[in-house]
Image: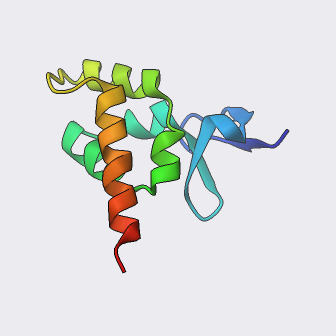
Amino acid sequence: MEYRICRYCEDTDNARRMIKYSTRSYAHWSCLLGRKSIEDGLEWLRSLPSHEIRNSPVMAIQEWLDARGWTGQRALELLLGMAKAADRKSAKP
């Protein structure tokens, strides 16, 4: 098992529960999203490749959306739509 340190909360955790957001920088999904507004967070999620979107923790994202008063789609539907869009974007020549 590979362990990393979250750059925000500084806790050690399994790398599978974290996201690598830059060179040698890992963070818990909730720590990273917790510092973003809905607009910034959704823009960041849309910029991820489809495999990262599919591996994202749906419940942590739903909690983040609920905490900010999101009234749109639920996290699962939102993420599936983002993954399909990322697939289409990467398939273009």
Residue 80, given in percent of the width and then of the height, sits at: 36, 38
Residue at (14, 22) in percent of width and height: 71
Q: Is residue 37 left or right of residue 11?
A: left
Q: Nearer the viewer, residue 29 or 11?
A: 29
Residue 54, given in percent of the width and then of the height, sits at: 49, 41
Quadrant of the frame with the C terminus: bottom left
Q: Outermost residue, right direction?
A: 1
Residue 35 visible, this angle: no
Residue at (22, 37) in percent of width and height: 38
Q: Nearer the viewer, residue 17 or 9?
A: 17
Image color mode: rainbow
Q: Is residue 2 left or right of residue 70?
A: right
Residue 19, given in percent of the width and then of the height, sits at: 57, 46
Residue at (52, 50) in percent of width and height: 51
Q: Outermost residue, left direction?
A: 71
Asked if residue 47 is positioned above or below residue 63 in the image, the reply reads below
Residue 25 visible, this angle: yes
Quadrant of the frame with the N terminus: top right
Res 39 → quadrant: top left
Residue at (18, 24) in percent of width and height: 70
Q: Nearer the viewer, residue 83 or 70?
A: 83
Q: Is residue 65 left or right of residue 11?
A: left
